[in-house]
Structures are given as structure tokens and as C-alpha cells.
Amino acid sequence: MINVNGSLIKDDKAGISIKNRGLYYGDAVFETIRVIHGKIIFWEDHYFRLMASMRIMRMEIPSSFSPEFLEEEILQIVNENGLENSPARVRMTVYRKEGGYYTPASLDVDYIITATALDNAFYTLPEGDYEVELFKDHYINSGLLSTIKTNNKAVNVLGSIFATENDFKNCFLLNENKSIVEALNANVFVVNGRKIKTPPLKDGALNGIVRKQLLSIVGTIKDFEIEEASISPFELQKADEIFLTNVIAGIQPVTKYRKKRYVTDVARELLAKLNVKARLG
């Protein structure tokens, strides 16, 4: 079942207009959400990021879009798909109502919510090699638009094709200043000793949910230092450890970049604390 503007529709009956502005112009934002046994993980952060994204995109936020209303809509579609007692991945897409060309006829929005099953209730550290390469064909533009989740993901799509064709698990993305911004589907953290760096939002990094959680977690751990600062590609091969984060996978260690292999010690330490926060939050 799929939730289309509050109506529950069977998958094979659901559809959108060929004039949908998300399809025509990428005029849409979305949230990917983890739900565990009927609980939305980090819901407050997702809600406020969605509201901020809609404001940045100059969308009219419906008066009904309260945290309670959207939470109920999400959990309803989870339940309708028989996932109330298991882990689920939810995507909520909000797109501007059709009409107009580049200039929209209306600022009002429609939405779709889908839910699919996940394998694990809480975050686990994947085993095996995870080799990442630098994607240099196209760049992420630094600035506010790159910090939100919109349907304009051409660089991520092309980078994913490059990774698949060359047997890499992921790619690092650069901005126009040749600084590391993020991975194809995740934020990036670079570790040297007890110092951790992650690209700042001003460089074009996505304002990630788990990124935010880890900034908070690391700030409470004695002897750890965390910094939001630009990262050059040269720093990657000097690092002791690199890991990637998103709300579905949690923490994904990078095991190899070019000729450099990395340890996973800090990722393991932080994963346990992330799981605790997910349970409590």
C-alpha cells in the first residue's frame, strides 16, 4: 500500500500525473526514515529538516503538517504494509502541485509515503571490504540547496553508475573547490587519532540526520575532538579511519581507498552509542 495525499492505494493502482513537477523539474523534497517496531527513529530531526527543506524550496507548508499528523501518516502506511512489528524503511516525498513551467502555478504541495522492509532492527557494522573511489566527473555545488534532500540527484546517480561499472562500493563527491563533500548516499567522517573531521554544511554537505547525532555523541566523549572543516582529497590517504553515515545504514566503515587500508575502531565505538541513542530518542 502507498499513501498518496492521505489516501491509501494499492501499489499497482497508485500513480502520479505525467505533469508532476517532481518529474518535470525535480521540484520535490524527500525524507528517508527508519521505523523500528512502530517507532520512528530520530523523528524530531526528520520533521524539522523536512520543514526547513520545504521553506528553502519556497513550498507552502499545509496547516495540517504537524509532527503528530505526519507521524500518524507514516505509521499508518507502515502498519498497512504489515511492518508494525519489524524494521521498515519509509520514504516521504513532497512535491509542488502541478502547473506552470519553471514558475509554478501554485506553491501548494502534494505528498507520497511508501514503506518497505529492512533486514535489521538496529544498526550493525557490516563485515567485508568496502572500497571507495573519488568521483571527479561532476561536482556538488556548495551552498544551501545541496544541504537538503531534493529530487535533483544527477551527480549521485552518475557517480553510482561509475561505482558499479568499476566495482567500487561507493564514491566520494567533490564540490567546485575540490573539497570532499560527502559520499554518494552518506556523510563522510575522517579520523586521525582521536580527532574526527566532517565536511561543513557550507561546503555543500547534506544536513544528515545521523551526522547530526554523531556530532552530538562525539562531543560528549572524553579525549575525542570533532571538527566541521573542509577536507581535501589528500587527507583521505593520510587518515587512520574513514566512515560513512546515513539513517538507514547507520555507520559504514571504509576499508580501502586507492592503496590505503583503514582500521574500523572508532566506527565500532560510535556504533554502540548510536544504537543507544536510537533506542532512547
Image (spheres, grey):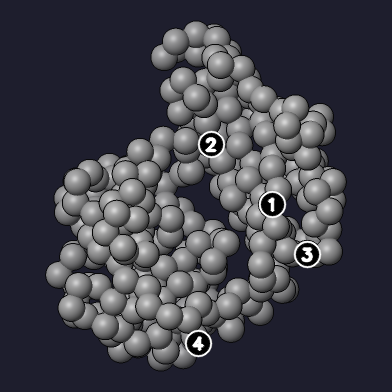
Q: CA distance from mark 1 to mark 4?
A: 29 Å
Q: Which of 83 and 37 lies nearest the eye of the viewer?
A: 83
Q: Quadrant of residue 97?
A: top right
Q: Which residue is mark 1?
A: 116
Residue 136, compared with residue 232, is above or below; it is above
Callout 2: SS:
strand
Callout 3: SS:
loop
Q: Which residue is mark 3?
A: 86
Q: Which of 219 and 65 lies nearest the eye of the viewer?
A: 65
Crowd band around label 4 with a 10 angstrom C-alpha radius: few (<14), some (14–19), many (20+): few
Q: Earlier in the sequence, mark 4 or mark 2?
A: 2
Q: Please name the residue shown 60% across and 74% down the image.
A: 123
Residue 44, compared with residue 91, is above or below; it is below
Q: Earlier in the sequence, mark 3 or mark 1?
A: 3
Q: Indicate the position of residue 169 as horizontal and vertical percent values.
A: 37, 64
Callout 4: SS:
helix
Q: Quadrant of residue 66?
A: top right
Q: Earlier in the sequence, mark 1 or mark 4?
A: 1
Q: Which residue is mark 2?
A: 29
**Which mark is drawn over residue 269?**
4
